[in-house]
C-alpha cells in the first residue's frame, strides 16, 4: 500500500475501499473486495466497511452518498451509491481525523507548539507522537524539511521548502479552497487572490484564482509568524530566468521575494492563461531540451516553430517545478492513479508504446529523482501537441455483402463511430489489402488468406457483432505492437 505523509494504514485502507467501490457498476462481495485491495482479510473488511457505511450516513444525511451492505444468495455484497455529490466531504473527514494530518496541519500553520500540550489535546502519549513524527519525516525528507519533537514540536527547514510542501499538503487533502477546515482567513485570502488575478488580467480563470488563494493563505500565514523568505542561490538562479511584473501596492507587507515566489510557483502549475516571460538572454534552450524536441519529431511528427516554442516553455516550467517541488515517486504514483494515467495504456497502446521508446532514449540523461515526474509531464506535453487519437493503430477492413453498396456505407459509418477513439479503420477495395474481412455471407473457401481474420455479421449489425469485431481488432492491434 502506498503511504503518503505518514498517514495511518487504516486511513489509507478506508480510502482504497471507497475508491474500489466507487469504480464498480455492480455490487462486490467481500471476497472480491479482498482481491482488489490486497491488504486485508474478509473479517477486517467486514468491520471497516460497516464503519464506513455508518460514517457515510453521518456525513450525507440526504443519502447523496451511501454504502449498502446486503445479504444475497452469493453472500454479503457491498454497493456505493453516489448521486450528483462527490466524495470530497468524506475524504476531508477521513484525512483530518488522522494523527499525521493533525500534526502537519498544526505545524504548517503554527510552526511550533508545546509537545506536552499537543499530546494532552489529542489524547496520545509522547512516545506515540514521536513514532508518528518519525513516519512523517520519512515521507517529507525530499523537501529538506523535518519535524523535531523535544519540549517543542517544531517544523524545521528552508522557508521556500516549507511553503512548497504546505501547498502540496493542502491540495492533496482539500481539493477545493473553501473545504480547508479550522481556518478563519479563507474569505480574506480568497478576496486577495481575486485582487491579484485582476491585477494580472487573469480574473476570468477561476481555477487560477483558486491556486492564487492557496498561495495567498500560505504566504499570509508565514508572514503572520514573522517568517522571512530567504531564497537559496539555486532558487535565485532559476527564478532569474524569468521577468516578473512589479508587485501591486495592495500587498503592503509582502516583500518582492514573497511576490516573485508566489508568481513562480503558480507558473509551475502549467496554467495556459498565466505565463511569465523568459528573459531574452536566457531564451536559448538547454541541450537536453533540444534533444527532447528532436526525438519527439523523430518518433511522433514534425513540429512548427510555434509548437517548438510551446514545448520549450512547458519543459522550462517542468524543470522549474522539479526544483521547487521534489515529489517522491510514491506520491507521484498516487497522483498517477488519481488521474487514471494507467488506463491510457489500455485505451491507446500504440501511442504509449511509441512514447515508451521515445522516453527510453531521452531519459538516459536524467537522474533517478527526476525520472517519474519528468515522464508523467512529458507525456502530458506530448498529448498537448499531438492528441492520442491522432496516433491510433490502423486496421484495414474489407466489407463483403450480398446487399447493395448502401449497406457497406452504413456499416462503415457505424464502425467508424463505434471505434473512432480506439482504432483508425481503413476500408479497402480488395480483400487482399485487408487485415479483417467482414461479410454478411460466407466467403468462398479460398478467398481469406491464412493471416487474415474473417467474421460474418448480421446485415443489421448487433451489439454482439460489435463485441466480436472488437476482439478481432484487439488481436490485430496486439500483433502490430509485437511487430514494431
Image (cartoon, rainbow, N blue to C red):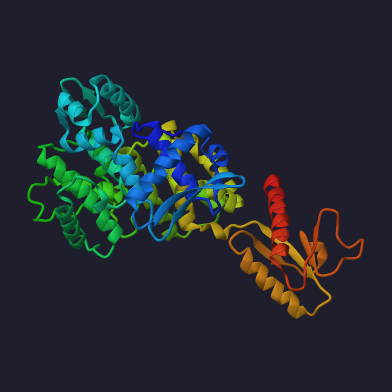
Q: How many marks?
A: 0
Q: Position of residue 363 (x, y in %)?
A: 49, 38
Q: Is residue 127 left or right of residue 470?
A: left
Determine the image quadrant of residue 398.
bottom right
Q: Is residue 207 left or right of residue 293?
A: left
Residue 56 vertical placement versus 203 (above, below) = above
Residue farthest to the right, as pictured: 445
Q: In the image shown, does 270 or 51 lie closer to the viewer?
A: 51
Q: Is residue 479 left or right of residue 46?
A: right
Q: In the image shown, does 360 or 331 lie closer to the viewer?
A: 331
Q: Residue at the spot x=40%, y=61% of the render?
A: 84
Determine the image quadrant of residue 232.
top left
Q: Position of residue 437 (x, y in %)?
A: 79, 63
Q: Position of residue 433 (x, y in %)?
A: 78, 63
Residue farthest to the left, as pictured: 252
Q: Is residue 337 left or right of residue 429?
A: left
Q: Residue at the spot x=72%, y=49% of the render?
A: 479
Residue 93 vertical placement versus 132 (above, below) = below
Question: From this viewpoint, is residue 293 visible?
Answer: no
Q: In the image shown, does 476 or 429 lie closer to the viewer?
A: 476
Q: Residue at the spot x=72%, y=53% of the render?
A: 476
Q: Position of residue 115 (x, y in %)?
A: 17, 25
Amino acid at each position: 500500500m502506498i503511504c503518503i505523509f505518514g498517514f495511518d494504514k487504516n486511513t489509507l485502507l478506508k480510502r482504497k475501499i471507497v475508491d474500489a467501490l466507487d469504480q464498480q457498476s455492480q455490487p462486490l462481495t467481500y471476497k472480491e473486495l479482498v482481491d482488489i485491495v490486497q491488504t486485508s482479510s474478509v473479517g477486517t473488511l467486514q468491520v471497516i466497511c460497516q464503519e464506513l457505511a455508518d460514517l457515510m450516513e453521518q456525513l450525507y444525511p440526504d443519502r447523496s452518498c451511501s454504502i449498502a451492505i446486503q445479504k444475497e444468495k452469493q453472500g454479503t455484497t457491498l454497493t456505493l451509491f453516489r448521486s450528483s455529490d462527490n466524495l470530497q466531504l468524506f475524504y476531508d473527514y477521513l484525512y483530518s481525523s488522522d494523527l499525521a494530518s493533525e500534526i502537519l496541519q498544526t505545524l504548517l500553520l503554527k510552526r511550533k507548539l508545546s509537545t506536552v500540550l499537543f499530546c494532552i489535546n489529542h489524547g496520545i502519549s509522547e512516545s506515540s507522537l514521536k513514532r508518528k513524527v518519525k513516519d512523517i519525516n520519512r515521507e517529507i525528507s525530499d523537501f529538506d524539511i523535518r519535524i523535531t519533537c523535544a519540549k517543542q514540536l517544531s517544523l524545521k527547514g528552508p522557508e521556500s521548502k516549507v511553503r512548497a510542501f504546505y501547498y502540496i499538503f493542502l491540495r492533496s487533502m482539500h481539493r477545493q479552497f473553501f473545504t480547508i477546515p479550522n481556518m478563519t482567513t479563507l474569505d480574506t485570502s480568497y478576496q486577495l487572490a481575486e485582487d491579484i488575478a485582476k491585477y494580472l488580467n487573469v480574473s476570468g480563470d477561476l481555477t487560477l484564482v483558486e491556486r492564487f488563494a492557496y498561495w495567498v493563505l500560505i504566504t499570509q500565514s508565514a508572514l503572520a509568524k514573522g517568517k522571512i523568505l530567504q531564497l537559496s542561490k539555486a532558487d535565485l538562479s532559476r527564478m532569474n530566468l524569468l521577468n516578473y511584473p512589479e508587485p501591486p501596492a495592495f500587498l503592503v507587507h509582502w516583500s518582492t521575494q514573497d511576490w516573485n515566489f508566489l508568481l513562480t510557483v503558480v507558473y509551475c502549475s502549467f496554467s495556459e492563461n498565466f505565463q511569465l516571460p523568459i528573459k531574452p538572454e536566457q531564451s536559448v534552450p538547454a541541450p537536453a531540451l533540444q534533444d527532447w524536441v528532436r526525438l519527439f519529431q523523430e518518433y511522433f511528427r514534425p513540429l512548427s516553430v510555434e509548437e517548438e516554442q510551446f514545448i520549450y516553455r512547458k519543459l522550462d516550467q517542468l524543470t522549474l517545478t522539479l526544483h521547487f517541488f521534489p515529489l517522491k515517486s510514491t506520491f507521484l504514483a498516487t497522483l498517477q492513479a488519481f488521474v487514471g494515467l494507467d488506463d491510457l495504456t489500455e485505451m491507446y497502446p500504440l501511442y504509449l508504446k511509441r512514447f515508451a521508446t521515445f522516453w527510453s532514449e531521452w531519459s538516459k540523461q536524467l537522474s533517478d529523482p527526476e525520472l517519474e515526474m519528468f515522464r508523467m509531464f512529458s507525456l502530458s506535453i506530448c498529448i498537448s501537441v499531438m492528441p492520442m487519437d491522432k496516433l491510433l493503430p490502423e486496421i484495414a477492413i474489407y466489407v463483403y455483402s450480398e446487399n447493395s453498396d448502401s449497406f457497406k456505407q452504413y456499416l462503415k459509418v457505424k464502425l467508424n463511430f463505434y471505434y473512432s477513439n480506439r482504432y483508425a479503420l481503413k476500408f479497402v477495395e480488395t480483400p487482399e489489402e485487408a487485415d479483417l474481412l467482414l461479410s454478411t455471407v460466407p466467403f468462398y473457401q479460398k478467398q481469406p488468406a491464412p493471416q487474415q481474420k474473417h467474421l460474418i455479421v448480421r446485415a443489421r449489425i448487433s451489439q454482439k457483432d460489435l463485441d466480436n469485431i472488437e476482439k478481432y481488432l484487439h488481436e490485430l492491434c496486439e500483433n502490430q505492437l509485437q511487430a514494431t
